[in-house]
Image (cartoon, rainbow, N blue to C red):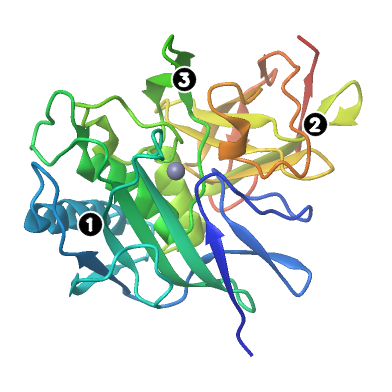
Amino acid sequence: MTRWLAMILTGALVFGDSAPALAYLKFGVPVRGQNVAVKWAQAPVRYFVSNTGVPGVTPTDFENAVGRAFATWQAVPTASITYQLAGVTDASPGSDDGASVLGFRSRPDLDRVLASTSFLVDSSTGALIESDIFFNSAFPWSVAAGGETGRFDLESIALHEIGHFSGLGHSALGETELISTGGRRVLSAEAVMFPIAFASGSIAGRTLKADDIAGISDLYPDGDFSTADGSLSGRVTKDGQPLFGAHVVAVNAASGLMVGSFTLNAQGQFSIGGLSPGLHIVRVEPLDDADIDSFFDGSVPVDLDFRVTFFDRVVIVPKGGDSGEIALTVVKK
Ligand SMILES: [Zn+2]
């Protein structure tokens, strides 16, 4: 028997305390006592676009912009996921009708939410049944090729939400600063799946980064992904105790590309997959550039009281294998 379960993707994250997740964060649901990654079983994944526009974005503009964003994820050579436009619909995103719908809705009450993704999961298997993405028409939107001052780039925001639509959670690879009017301004982001969008006018969010590519490839591995790439794993301790929720970043020494993960279990273990083989620099840092609830569901306290620490040697990631457990020790701020 199939039981359906509705979950909201913005923020809430469910995880078990068994094996640590690979790079970035995946969503998980408990299935018969195991934590199973939420992902699509069908291929291609079919989606509908709703036939409503907003000032500056016609329904056709909308269809084309989200189509480009889907195509960007589909073009990742090491990932197998494919998407297909099923048609235009009068339905709104957010109704649990078995059809995945992307469209505008006006939610002026959600004054910090540009867009969000909700989904239905078959809780007996973890398979996605439906993902809906709503774009908040209370904000100004643009599909201009070079972006438009004062308006948010629909393609960029769609690219982030389609990551959720596909089963990816947030990445913490970004730097922000607090702004006087409240909220945070993004200074840099090394992942489209960073939870805070670039400012209006920016089109920087149209391009996937190494962390996003590792994430989608890990969920939907294609070709020689698992034999060509490698992983890096270890554990983080403070005062001899395992540390939960530490952000661990692997930086490829040759390319500078970064992939991040977290310590996600009671043993303080992490594993970062989807890495290009070679030498990596490893950094561990507290999660301090975004709200904790963008990553964790609050069931386990996240320790932020430690200094940014680099592992004291360069780590070799082998082709098709793992580095072997490295031990990172951090100290209080
Ligand atoms: Zn998000």
Q: Circles 3 and 1: CB distance less than 8 Å?
A: no
Q: How far from the left and from the top, in percent, is residue 43?
A: 35, 76
The residue singled out by tag 3 in the image is 175
Q: Secondary structure at mark 1?
A: helix
Which amino acid does the dot numbered 1 rest on?
Ala
Horizontal side of 80 relative to 119 (left or right) equals left
Q: Is residue 158 above or below residue 241?
A: below
Q: Is residue 319 above or below residue 327?
A: below
Does residue 315 show up? yes
Does residue 323 show up? no
The residue singled out by tag 1 in the image is 71
Q: Residue furthest front?
A: 109
Depth check, front residue: 31 or 54: 54
> Mark 3 to mark 1: distance in Å?
27 Å
Horizontal side of 74 relative to 290 (left or right) equals left
Which amino acid does the dot numbered 3 rest on?
Glu
If the picture is divided into quarters, which one holds ligand 1? top left
Depth check, front residue: 272 or 332: 332
Query: Mark 3 vs mark 1: which is more N-terminal?
Result: 1
Residue at 8%, 58% (x, y): give it.
60
Q: Residues within 10 Å of mark 3 (few under 14, many from 20)?
A: some
Which amino acid does the dot numbered 2 rest on?
Leu
Residue at 8%, 37% (x, y): give it.
144
Residue 113 picture quarter: top left
Horizontal side of 20 relative to 228 (left or right) equals right
Q: Is residue 21 above or below residue 167?
A: above
Q: Secondary structure at mark 3?
A: strand
The residue singled out by tag 2 in the image is 243
Quadrant (top left, top right, bottom left, bottom right) of the C terminus: top right
